[in-house]
Image (cartoon, rainbow, N blue to C red):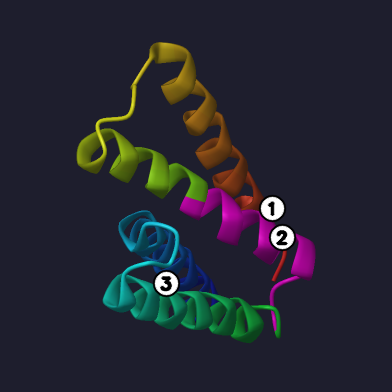
Amino acid sequence: MDWLILIIGSVCEVGWLVAMKYAYGFTRLWPTVIMFFFMTASVGCLGVAVKTIPAGTAYAVWTGGSIAAIAIVGVFLFHEPATPMRLASFALIVIGMVGLRLSGVS
């Protein structure tokens, strides 16, 4: 269950990053409010997950998951480049996360 909470935390991190983009340097109220909501939820999920998952593993999966997800969101929502090297690099992050999960820790 804590792995699911950790993944939800990564998704919330993506939410606050997207909201931050739309907040335009905190000049728009509602995107800023949404950003702080998702930020709190994201860190809260990480806090719950580290009760049973080693902190280093949890942090790596939490940040790695959000890095990979925001890259995909960036390509589709913000029209960021999807070069082969960039995509391969993100794939390596995902492979590392899967490796951590399969390592048998927790």
Identify which residue is drawn at 72% across, 64% down.
105
Q: Which mark is residue 103?
A: 1
17, 91: nearer the viewer? 17
Between the C-alphas of marks 1 and 3, the distance is 21 Å
Q: Which residue is mark 2?
A: 57
The amino acid type found where label 2 is placed reads Thr
Q: Position of residue 100 (x, y in %)?
A: 66, 51
SS of the residue under disc 1? loop
User: The magenta stretch spans which residues?
Assistant: 52-66
Residue 87 lies in the magenta stretch: no
Q: Where is residue 58 shown, x and y percent of the image?
A: 67, 65
Name which quarter of the figure residue 99 lies in: top right
Q: Residue at x 48, y 54 (%)?
A: 66
Measured Cα–Cα span from mark 2 to mark 3: 15 Å
Nearer to us: label 2 or label 3: 3
* Dot placed on the residue nearer the N-terminal end, 1 or 3: 3
Toward the top, the furthest residue is: 84
- Specify whether 14 is left or right of 96: left
Are circles 1 and 2 on residues that touch, CB within 8 Å? yes
Residue at image x 37%, y 67%? 27
x, y percentage for residue 63? 59, 55
Q: Which mark is residue 8?
A: 3
**Residue 57 colored in magenta in the image:** yes
The amino acid at mark 1 is Ser
Disc 1 crowd rating (10 Å Cα; few below 14, some 14-19, many 20+) is: few
The nearer-to-camera label among 1 and 2 is: 2
Q: Main secondary structure of the magenta part?
A: helix
Three-letter amino acid code of the residue under disc 3 = Ile
Tell me which numbered mark, 2 or 3, is placed earlier along the sequence. Answer: 3
Residue 30, given in percent of the width and then of the height, sits at 28, 77
Secondary structure, mark 2, is helix
